[in-house]
Every structure is written in structure tokens, then in C-alpha cells.
Amino acid sequence: NKTIAFRSRMISFNSFNGSLFTVDVDGNLQEQIPVPRGGFCSFSPDDKKMAYNRVFRDFRTWKRYRGGMADDIWIYDFQTKQVENITDNPAQDIIPMWHGTKIYFLSDRDELKRMNLYVYDLESKQTSKITDYIEFDIKFPSLGVNTIIYENAGYLYKFDLTTQQSEKINIQFA
């Protein structure tokens, strides 16, 4: 729609405690999304719910971290004001990407503690690992219409959401 969501520390000086805001493209004042803290976020197709991380920081450099600041993915329902933790795992579960009835995200919960792509099915409430990189972490995923683009080992890949297959993107420079 004509609204942009963004994260900011404008009301907190703590580098871990940011908030989520929206602003319309016409440049009116921002409005805080009514959750106490927020980081990465993604909205349901009907805009009635939001999947989000509570920790503001990006933990790319906190490899294999297990502790109190390890992030989970939460769903906030704008109508009922209810919050649900859908990952509840000691590992990092970050960068939710809502697509239809599924939420894709990165996690380092496997035995090698590598960031791979996972999917949470909202209907079955099951989480599945859908990539299996063992040497390098996935970084910087971005959701498109039916594809997630991400970086691994310095290469770009696309994950097709319809076929559930990854493919390396060959980039040629002129």
C-alpha cells in the first residue's frame, strides 16, 4: 500500500531497543506500531498481522550466539492485540518474511550453527529447514513476489517459493 514501515531508535538510546513505525508516502508524521520493541518485520497479506523480531540489532557478527539476546520471531495481531512467539528457540531466528500462509526466516539452529533458510507454516504450526548450507551463513535475504534472494559465500541465490528450489544467480558485468 502507500505506507512504509521502518525501525528506529528515536525514542530509546539503547542500541538493542528500537521501535517500529509507519509513515505514509505523502510525508505525514510517523506513527509507532503498538509493540514495545521491534526490529525486522513483515506483514501478513491482509495487513492484519505482523511477524517481527523484538531485538533491534542485526546479529550477523554474533555467530553461534545462544543467550538472552537471541531473537525469536513473534506475530502481533493488530485487531486482538495478542502476541505469539512462533520460534521459541535458543538460536537466532531473524528476518521474518511473510508470504501467504508461511513465514520464511533465517536461523542458525542446526547442529553446525549455520544461518539457513527456514519456513514456519501458519496452518500446521510446523517449522522446516529448506536450505542446507554447511560452510557459510545465508545473509541479507529479501522477499519478492515468489522468490527470496539471498547471499551465501559471496554469491547471490534465488529461492523459488513455488518449487522450493535454490539456484545461483549468474551475474555478468559489461
Image: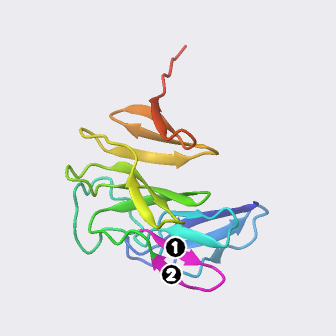
User: Residue 80: where, in percent of width, then height?
Assistant: 62, 86
Single out the residue that lies furthest toward the front. Answer: 124
Left or right, 69 with reference to 42: left
Q: Quadrant of residue 90?
A: bottom left
Answer whether residue 78 is magenta in the image. Answer: yes
User: Residue 50: where, in percent of width, then height?
Assistant: 58, 70
Label disc, if present, on residue 75 of the rendered structure: 1
- Residue identified by numbered label 2: 83
Q: Nearer the viewer, residue 38 or 85?
A: 85
Q: Nearer the viewer, residue 50 or 39?
A: 50
Q: Residue at x 63, y 79 (%)?
A: 78
Q: Which residues are magenta?
A: 73-84
Amino acid at the residue labelled 1: Ile
User: Residue 75: where, in percent of width, then height?
Assistant: 52, 73
Q: Residue at x 60, y 45 (%)?
A: 144
**What is the secondary structure assignment of the residue under circle 2?**
strand
